[in-house]
Image: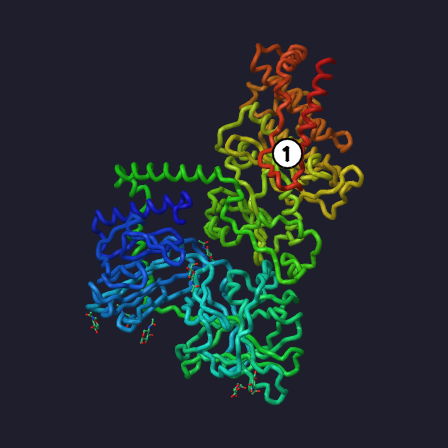
Amino acid sequence: MAILYLHRIVESLYILVVFILQFSSLQFPSLGYTFPDKYFINCGSDSNVSESGRVYVGESNLGTSFVSSHSEKSESAAPSPLYQTARIFRSESWYEFSIDANATYLVRLHFFPFSFPSNLSSARFNVSVPGFWLSQNFDGGDHTNNNSALVKEFFMHIPTSTIKITFRPLPSSLAFVNAIELFIVPLNLIADQVARFTLDNRGVLSTYTGLYSRVLETKHRLNVGGQTTNDTLLRKWIPDDSYLVYPGNAHNHPAYKGQIPYHVHDDSGGPNATRYTAPSDVYGTAKESRNASASAEDIQLFNITWALPVEKNIDHLLRLHFCDYWSPSSGLLFFQLSIYDNQVMPVNNDGNVSKVVPSPYYYDFMVRSDNSGFMRVSVIPNASATIINAFLNGLEIMKVIETSSSVSDGQESNSRHISLPVVLGSVLGGLVLLFVVVLLGFLCRLRMRKEKPVENSDWLPIPVTAGGSSHSRLTDGTSLGSPLPNINLGLKIPLIDLQLATKNFHASQIIGKGGFGNVYKGVLRNGEIAAVKRSQPGSGQGLPEFQTEIMVLSKIRHRHLVSLIGYCDERFEMILVYEYMEKGTLRDHLYNTKLPTLSWKQRLEICIGAARGLCYLHKGAAGGIIHRDVKSTNILLDENLVAKVADFGLSRSGPLDTQPYVSTGVKGTFGYLDPEYFRSQQLTEKSDVYSFGVVLLEVLCARAVIDPSLPREQINLAEWGMLCKNKGILQEIIDPSIKDQIDQNSLRKFSETVEKCLQEDGCDRPSMGDVLWDLEYALQLQRGANAIPREPYEDSSSSLSVSLQLPNVRRLPSLSTLSEADDSIVRGDESDNAADSVFSQLKIDDAR
Ligand SMILES: *[C@@H]1O[C@H](CO)[C@@H](O)[C@H](O)[C@H]1NC(C)=O
Ligand SMILES: *[C@@H]1O[C@H](CO)[C@@H](O)[C@H](O)[C@H]1NC(C)=O
Ligand SMILES: *[C@@H]1O[C@H](CO)[C@@H](O)[C@H](O)[C@H]1NC(C)=O
Ligand SMILES: *[C@@H]1O[C@H](CO)[C@@H](O)[C@H](O)[C@H]1NC(C)=O
Ligand SMILES: *[C@@H]1O[C@H](CO)[C@@H](O)[C@H](O)[C@H]1NC(C)=O
Ligand SMILES: *[C@@H]1O[C@H](CO)[C@@H](O)[C@H](O)[C@H]1NC(C)=O
Ligand SMILES: *[C@@H]1O[C@H](CO)[C@@H](O)[C@H](O)[C@H]1NC(C)=O
């Protein structure tokens, strides 16, 4: 898993290098090293161990060795190979992990105090992360002879890009650890803000903020009414029976047979659960009241109460999971929730947001434990409900660890930070060889991955709703109804995958910004590089538009259109994932750039590609699509400088010829805007033609379409270009770097095309198909000029060369990634027809 991505490899090599440097200079009294951001480590061992479906990597396989601590292997028959080895520390030591900043992480430490060869029962130590004690005065002797490991689990929001876990043996003792797990958890699994219950307030809730600046330690995790189980985050859930105060009051409801319909949207910020919140084993089992139909007087006596041991007078996060999977509809079953015998709130089975049964939801409470050493939680049936009952599906209690000033925050490590160039300088040699070998290995892997069809990717398709609800989960919380069944669920990517792909949406991954939010570069699980466009809430794009965009985009596949790889609509997110375009935007290659200038021929080919893409949008998909924001930054280039049109965010599809789309507001970019559209707000495909004309001028002149620093008549490129064309001085404003290579006939054809595109009146402008033809022609003229001795200003000779090369003109655009299975994809490529008309028109032209 860890070797999926190149950056990971580079990172681990860097770590290796850093470590070796530390080793060679013997500068450091303590152990310190760094790993990538998802770790399962078999401490103190050289070999990997597989346990519960996870591979715990041996420390030596991480390319590390140790200075001040040693490892010991137990001869004892520990229950798992994972626990037969431990890393033993005899002085303060730490593991340092590099991670993605500003994310919530789960840390698990496994302790199995074996007694031979070292007697770990005598271990006494503290464990800390910067600012927090995770464990104080840990006593190995407390945990001996149970023949099971003690696993401590913590959740922490980490603002920095490294995390150090430090082990401090008490004087003349030792510290140890058998295994470490550290990985990022889904966004919003734990919120910064929760409801606060205090005994002083006797059940009145207030607000508690600041979980992100604290650490949570798991104390209890109960699958109420169910069996021991575990989940995707490898959390262990155990039965609740031994914590029941009145076992006679409750019994287990039969388990749910269907699929738990997890929520995908949680726009309300409400209590809806996602599939990461708790597994279906938890939501699909419950404990309910026995003798539910009792009379009103003694209903209290049928409460279900749990008492769980906790530390006294400390804040705990209490999370209660509910899912009524047996009531025929919502609103029939409600009951009272109590904490420490104080009524807190009524619980209704409709789960607040979608009035559907079943629907999984949860409530979080910050509760300060009392003096009893127990946390008491009760559910009490309500006699006025139609169905008199009370139930609970799951319960979690996590202790809140406050920051402590007695923990050194690990600042001393900063002075030891070694920058990469220095390191490379000092340990080149063998490492270079190693790097090359690993890199080659990686590239081979990558190639193998690339050859796999997309269907084999690691993306998990979301399970289709079952359980008798006709309600579409995707529409939960929205008023939108019909278009959703068309959404291609196979394109859905889990949010956690996108977090991992983009280093948790880290600023260093941003490759574009706009009003909608940011675009991040990311490496997906299948090794594919992608552009991840994440809409910010409040960016103006609503959910219906987002869904429309997915529907439109998922149907479009064309060599000259940037294709949609997937999307994510979990929780608040609206994320679109596109293919990544290596060479960036067309504008990046034209001006204000350090990139090499494009030749005239390359520019023509790019324009032709973009024209093909637009042509396909206009004529290809049924009904036609108007781009509405054609500009040089929306034309992207792949590694071979093949142009692809991007950003259909403003696209609208509709029957073009019959009734032009009347938009509600002018959209587009100043400088490219069709003046006719601006006046009439009548949107036609000719508006795209106008904007494309401006792009052509931009390509020819290599300057901004609006440049306020220029004299007044030159500010607007479209106007200035037309003025020059009319005066016959267009030659003077051409990009000087291509002036010498450009063939006069090619230029003439090109500038005529621009002029036609920029006509005031939409109906005087050519169609995209005609523009495409003209550009093809201009390219042929240029090629002819390059191929045979130039006879300037002689159209006849160029025509001759053109007719000789006719077969080349009919270059069929290839449909690159059409999937046969999807019949919603338009079968033919309309630019075929365009090419046909190019063909016939060319012959007519030649015959003239
Ligand atoms: C936990 O998950 C692992 C792997 O999925 C499985 O082998 C193990 O039996 C599970 N344990 C329980 C108690 O369900
Ligand atoms: C983390 O979040 C804080 C506050 O939201 C921000 O100031 C900081 O720059 C972020 N750090 C990184 C590395 O993104
Ligand atoms: C290990 O140490 C504990 C106390 O530190 C002691 O009770 C126990 O007998 C020792 N076990 C062995 C095998 O030495
Ligand atoms: C091990 O057993 C002792 C005493 O029986 C108990 O106090 C301790 O909590 C147990 N530890 C674990 C991890 O079960
Ligand atoms: C371990 O924690 C205890 C309790 O806070 C503290 O008194 C002790 O000094 C710590 N020991 C070390 C080595 O940090
Ligand atoms: C509850 O129901 C059981 C049978 O389901 C019965 O034996 C018991 O007496 C009832 N208890 C009360 C308090 O009604
Ligand atoms: C809960 O039920 C038990 C036994 O049925 C009863 O003794 C207790 O008073 C009840 N608690 C409340 C708060 O009603």
Q: For mark 1, what is the residue?
A: 613
Judge from the rendering whether residue 593 lies leftward or rightward of residue 81; answer left or right: right
Q: Nearer the viewer, residue 604 or 185?
A: 185
Q: Is mark 1 within 8 Å of ligand 2?
A: no
Above or below, 775 relative to 188 = above
Rendered location of residue 807, percent (x, y): 63, 18
Q: Quadrant of the C terminus?
A: top right
Examine the rendering and report whether any part of residue 725 can be seen: no
Amino acid carrying mark 1 in the image: Gly
Q: Quadrant of residue 562?
A: top right
Crowd class of label 1 (few under 14; some 14 to 19; many from 20; radius 10 Å): many
Residue 6 position within the rendered picture, expressed as x and y whole percent measured from the top left: 40, 43
> Residue 184: image x %, image y %?
44, 57
**Quadrant for ligand 3?**
bottom left
Number of dots carrying numbers: 1
Q: Residue at x 35, y 63 (%)?
A: 109
Quarter of the figure with residue 259: bottom right
Where residue 120 sits, quadrant-wise, is bottom left
- Local secondary structure at mark 1: helix
User: What residue do we see at 41% from left, 66% from top?
Assistant: 215
Q: Position of residue 254 (x, y in %)?
A: 55, 71
* Viewer can see residue 515: yes
Question: Residue, x 28% and y 71% (percent of image)?
Answer: 145
| Residue at image location 62% in from the left, 36% down from the top | 631
